[in-house]
Image (cartoon, grey):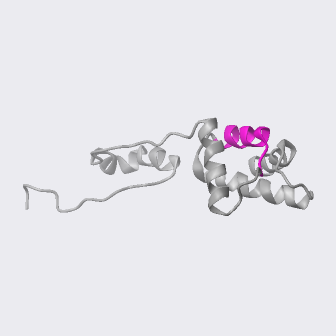
Amino acid sequence: MDSRSPFATLLIGQPTLRRKIKLGVLAALDQRIAVRCHMTGMTAEETGAYLRRHLALAGRSDTLFSDDAITLIHSTSRGYPHAVNNLAIASLLAAFTANKAIVDESNARTTVTEVTTE
């Protein structure tokens, strides 16, 4: 029993998990983590490709986001997929309510303002 570890687990979470594990209260857990991996955000080009790929999976091959909107979504989300998804969906809703066929920078900016002021 002493020669091997009877328990192994994966801790997967948002960037805040890393900060919480570093707290003094969780020092024992922090000392027992053998391997750490950090996923960085996507680049601006990867964010655009990510959005286009998800739209293609949903059956849309036409352009739904302007380049300026993608740039704003990327810079606000820092390229993290979960944040990109949330901003993209909210931007699509903003464009729909404004009767626009394409999400432009003004729709994305409206969304960013709503999300970041909460």
The image position of residue 55, as x and y in percent, is 67, 57
Q: Which residue sits furthest front?
A: 61
Residue located 76% across and 57% down the image: 90
Given residues 67 and 60, the one toward you in this image is 60
The image position of residue 107, as x and y in percent, is 85, 49
Given residues 73 and 114, the one toward you in this image is 73
**Going by the image, does 40 lie left or right of 4?**
right
Q: Which residue sits furthest right?
A: 99
Residue located 45% across and 45% down the image: 18
Snapshot quadrant of residue 3: bottom left
The image position of residue 92, as x and y in percent, is 79, 57
Task: Give the quarter of the figure containing the N terminus.
Answer: bottom left
**Going by the image, does 12 lie left or right of 64?**
left
The image position of residue 73, as x and y in percent, is 71, 43
Question: Is residue 73 a member of the stretch shown in magenta?
Answer: yes
Question: Is residue 72 a member of the stretch shown in magenta?
Answer: yes
Name above or below for residue 8 compared with residue 104: below
Tag count: 0
**Going by the image, does 56 lie left or right of 98?**
left
Is most of the magenta stretch helix, strand or loop? Answer: helix
The stretch of residues the image draws in magenta is 64-77
Residue located 39% across and 50% down the image: 25
